[in-house]
Amino acid sequence: MAWVRYRRSAVEYAPAILTLAGLIVAWEILCRALDVPKWLLPAPSHIAIETWEIRAVLPLHFFATLTAIVGGFFIAIAVGIPLAILVVYSPFLRRVIYPILLMLQSVPKVALAPLLLLWIGYGMTSNMVVAATVAFFPIVINTATGLESVNAELLELTRSFDSSAWRVFWRVRLPWAMPYVFSSFKVAITLAVIGAVVAEFVGADKGLGYLIISSAGAMKTSIMFGMLVILSLTGITCFYVVAWTERWLCPWYLPAEVDPAKG
C-alpha cells in the first residue's frame, strides 16, 4: 500500500520536476553560451558553488529565519483564532474589528515593519511579530467563514437536544470549520515566510533576509539567488507540513478530486 502511494506521488509530481530540471539546464546553457556576467545573472552551477562556500554560517542564518517563521505563524494562530470566534459570536465586535483588520491588511507590510521594529525593538521577537502581522489576516477571515458556514439544519438538530453553546461550538462548529481553518493555515505559513524576510530586510544581524541584503550590497548575486532557493524550499516544506497535519487531525475530511472530463 505504501509503495502504491509512493508510486502515485512520483507520477503526480514527475511533470513538475522534469519541467523545473529542464528550465535549470536551459538557464545554465544560456548563461554559458551568452557569457552573462555573474553579477547580473549567475548560472545555476555558480549559485550552487557559492552557496556551498558559506555552508559554515548558513545554518545560523537559516534557523534564525525558520524561528521567525514558525514563531510568527503560531502567534498569528494564537491571535487569529480567538478573533475569529469573537467576530462570529458578537455582531458588535464584527462591526468594530473588521474595519481595523481591513485597514491593517491594506497597509504595505514593508512600510509597517519599521514602525513595529521601532516600537518593539530589534531582535527575534520583533521578527516574529512582523511575520505574525503578515500571516494572521487569512486565519481570521477563513476561520470565521468556516464557523459561520455550518449547515443550519445540523445546528437546529443539535440545539433540539438542549446542547449548550459551548457544546455546539466544540462538537459542531469547530469540526465543520476545520477545513477552512487549515486552508487558512496553509496560506498563513507561506505569508509568514514573507513577513520574516521583510523583518530581516528592515533590521536584523542574521537570517536569510539579512544575507540577501548584505549580498546585494556586495554584488554577490549568486548568494542572493541561493537564499531565494532556500526560502522557496522552506516555504514549500512548511506548506506540506501543515497539509500533512491536516490529514492527521482531520481524517474525516478529504478534499474531492476534480475530474477534468466531468468538471
Image (cartoon, rainbow, N blue to C red):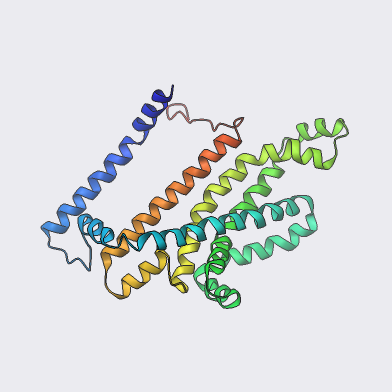
At a point 73% along the width and 51% down the height, the residue shown is: 85
Residue 132 sits in quarter: bottom right
Q: Tell me if residue 261 comes above or below residue 84 in the rendering.
A: above
- Tell whether 6 sits left or right of 132: left
Name the one closer to the observer, 151 or 35. Answer: 35
The residue furthest bottom is 118
The residue furthest front is 56
Quadrant including the N terminus:
top left
At a point 50% along the width and 59% down the height, the residue shown is: 67
Q: Tell me if residue 139 comes above or below residue 180 in the rendering.
A: below
At a point 21% along the width and 59% down the height, the residue shown is: 46
- Tell whether 26 sits left or right of 239: left
Percent x, y of residue 210: 40, 69
Name the one closer to the observer, 179 or 237. Answer: 237
Percent x, y of residue 209: 41, 66
Percent x, y of residue 202: 46, 73
Residue 21 sits in quarter: top left
How many discs appear?
Answer: 0
At a point 80% along the width and 38% down the height, the residue shown is: 167
Percent x, y of residue 164: 85, 39
